[in-house]
């Protein structure tokens, strides 16, 4: 018998998880959802691209770019070594950050949203990205402008798939607050140049001055911003961050367009993304939309950026689940494989149920965006999608706030569970090793419950919109019709009862109390909607796993959207079967988490429970 050897720094037990799998082909939830909302011919045409993109997302090259962007955070140089101010502030970002942007453009994360060959489905194909907010607003206006208008140049730059693609920022938040934009202290004055300049995009007719407290994408080419005009009302403006001028010597040069970086923000996460406080002084800008109609003009941008936010939350959450699963496959504890220990199986299954519910809510909202944008039904003529026109607009307006708030909150909790499930190594934050860095994912995702509206802001907006005019009636008529599409009597009855109770509460409480309960109204509605979508998804093909996920969500109150619900509405149904626990539940845990039946030689979870016949 060999003599036991003590461990050293380089020998003994070392966990060695396998590499992460293709982020597209290893995600059955995403594949299933896309197959629901995209025509088969469209899905087949984009499948090779999605597969390639999924492979590149876990490649060594992309990991190195990501690590480089995290290691070397942005910084600003405003003066040269002699103390002279540069013509514009030098915002220095790492090469990895720049390459990630180019990689995204090559993979059509913006341009796919404007590919007319994809028709009404182009939003479902597109990878959501913040730059698209500006592109979306411009796309609806440039057709009314002459071909020489500089907005055409801006739009083409934003949808470019080449390395010289443009990005944009949105500057609304000031020291007075982010949501209450009526207190904006930035002002715009009409002051066109006497003679046309050298740079049409940089020679806007308005001079904008003020201070922006949180300015996203400070390295962008252009920005959309709100400012007050002499009327005291808000207007939306578009301006490049730099402009080209001709000096007294007749030589052209690039200078700051009245933008000075006061300081960069030191944030918990998204450290590679430069966010700054900006002082604007006589920034030349173009009026975008009608004068004094700033909120109406910029509101569509918020819809797009909210979609970006909840899709990003889902993506981060899915990556965290993938890391957790890879770890569980490689790890043993109490002499048993972690991936088969019953309590761990239950955790993984619960994460999958929650993620599937959020996934259905998210992609329904994305598909609905296509209906609203194109004013035509979906290509698949799906019965549960609202009709184009007022119905689709009311449902979409309700869901952009709901999906953004609920999914972002769910993702933060879900990612933290993944981190915790890996023990101490999950708490590590190694900038050089992004492949398994859940801490970085958690830090980066935290902002998604804040920007584009905090949970409270969105809950207030959600309630005030639904109780306004006949919006609740329109929304309710659509949801009533959708619930009748569910074939399972148990599932339909449970959801119908929940919706009836919630609608009654909407109509009987006074408005002030309803707003105060805004979170619970919004999260409860999200639970009902996700449940309906899970049921309809399962009944498309009677997939056993999809059916069990729907049953757990609706009848057993498993999974769910979190604690911010009316607990007298979201309850365990009296028809919930005995499969809510015990051996049968464990079998389904394994199918949901791993897509396979539970092996006969299962783990027990603790040495005190182990028997010789059950040990693996």
Image (cartoon, helix red, strand yellow):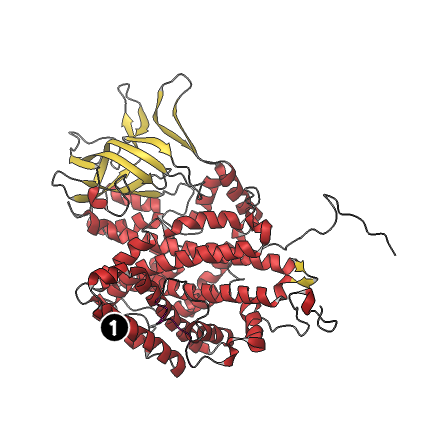
Report whether residue 259 is seen.
yes
Q: Is residue 110 left or right of residue 506?
A: right
In-image side of 72 versus 503 (left or right): right
> Which residue bears the numbered disc 1?
504
Residue at 52% across, 55% down: 320
- Depth order, front residue of 61/349: 349
Is 101 situated left or right of 342 in this image?
A: left
Name the residue rendered at 47%, 67% in the picture: 353
| Quarter the C terminus occupies | bottom right
Identify the image quadrant of residue 603: bottom right
| Residue occupying the far left of the picture | 231
Q: Position of residue 225 (x, y in %)?
A: 26, 42
Q: Is residue 567 above or below residue 57?
A: below
Is-magenta flag for residue 440?
A: no
Q: Farthest residue toward the bottom?
A: 489
Quarter of the image that includes the N terminus = bottom right
Q: Is residue 520 above or below residue 501?
A: above
Q: Is 569 included in the stretch rendered in magenta?
A: yes
Q: Secondary structure at mark 1?
A: helix
> Range of the magenta residues?
566-574
Q: 616 or 557: which is nearer to us?
A: 557
The spot of residue 349 in percent (x, y) is: 53, 67
């Amino acid at each position: 018998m060999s003599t036991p050897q003590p461990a050293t720094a380089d020998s003994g037990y070392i966990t060695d998880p396998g590499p992460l799998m293709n982020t597209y082909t290893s995600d059955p939830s995403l594949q299933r959802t896309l197959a629901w909302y995209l025509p088969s011919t469209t899905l087949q045409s984009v499948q090779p691209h999605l597969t390639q993109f999924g492979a590149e997302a876990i490649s060594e090259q992309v990991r190195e770019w990501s690590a480089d962007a995290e290691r070397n955070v942005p910084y600003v140089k405003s003066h040269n070594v002699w103390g002279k101010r540069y013509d514009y502030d030098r915002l220095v970002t790492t090469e990895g950050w720049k390459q990630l942007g180019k990689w995204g453009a090559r993979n059509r994360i913006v341009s796919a949203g404007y590919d007319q060959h994809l028709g009404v489905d182009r939003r479902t194909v597109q990878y959501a990205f913040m730059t698209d907010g500006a592109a979306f607003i411009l796309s609806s206006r440039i057709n009314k402008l002459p071909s020489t208008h500089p907005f055409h140049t801006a739009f083409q730059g934003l949808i470019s798939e080449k390395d010289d693609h443009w990005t944009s920022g949105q500057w609304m938040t000031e020291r007075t607050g982010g949501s209450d934009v009526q207190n904006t202290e930035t002002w715009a004055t009409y002051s066109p140049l006497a003679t046309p300049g050298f740079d049409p995009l940089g020679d806007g007719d308005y001079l904008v001055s003020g201070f922006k407290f949180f300015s996203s994408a400070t390295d962008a080419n252009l920005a959309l911003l709100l400012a007050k005009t002499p009327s005291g009302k808000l207007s939306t403006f578009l301006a490049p961050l730099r402009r080209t001028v001709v000096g007294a010597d007749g030589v052209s040069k690039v200078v700051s367009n009245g933008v000075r970086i006061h300081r960069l923000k030191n944030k918990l996460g998204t450290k590679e993304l430069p966010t700054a406080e900006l002082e604007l002084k006589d920034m030349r800008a173009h009026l975008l939309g009608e004068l004094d109609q700033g909120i109406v003009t910029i509101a569509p941008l918020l819809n797009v950026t909210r979609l970006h936010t909840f899709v990003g939350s889902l993506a981060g959450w899915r990556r965290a689940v993938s890391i957790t699963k890879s770890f569980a496959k490689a790890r043993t504890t109490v002499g048993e494989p972690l991936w088969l220990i019953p309590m761990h199986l239950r955790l993984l299954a619960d994460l999958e149920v929650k993620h599937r519910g959020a996934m259905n809510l998210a992609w329904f909202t994305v598909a609905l965006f296509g209906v609203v944008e194109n004013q035509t039904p979906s290509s698949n003529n799906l019965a549960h999608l609202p009709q184009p026109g007022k119905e689709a607009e009311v449902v979409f307006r309700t869901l952009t706030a709901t999906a953004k708030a609920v999914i972002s909150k769910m993702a933060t909790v879900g990612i933290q569970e993944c981190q915790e499930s890996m023990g101490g190594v999950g708490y590590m934050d190694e900038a050089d090793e992004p492949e398994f860095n859940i801490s970085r994912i958690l830090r980066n995702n935290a902002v998604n419950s804040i920007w584009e509206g905090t949970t409270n802001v969105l809950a207030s907006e959600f309630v005030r919109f639904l109780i306004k005019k006949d919006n609740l009636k329109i929304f309710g008529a659509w949801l009533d019709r959708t619930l009748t599409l569910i074939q399972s009597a148990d599932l339909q009855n449970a959801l119908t009862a929940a919706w009836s109770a919630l609608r009654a509460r909407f109509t009987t409480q006074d408005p002030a109390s309803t707003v105060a309960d805004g979170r619970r109204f919004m999260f409860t509605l999200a639970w009902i909607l996700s449940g309906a979508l899970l049921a309809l998804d399962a009944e498309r093909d009677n997939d056993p796993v999809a059916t069990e996920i729907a049953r757990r969500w609706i009848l057993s109150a498993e999974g769910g959207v979190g604690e911010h619900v009316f607990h007298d509405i979201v309850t365990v149904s009296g028809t919930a079967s005995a499969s809510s626990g015990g051996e049968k539940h464990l079998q389904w845990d394994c199918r949901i988490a791993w897509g396979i039946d539970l092996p006969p030689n299962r783990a027990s979870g603790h040495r005190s429970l182990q028997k010789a016949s059950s040990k693996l």
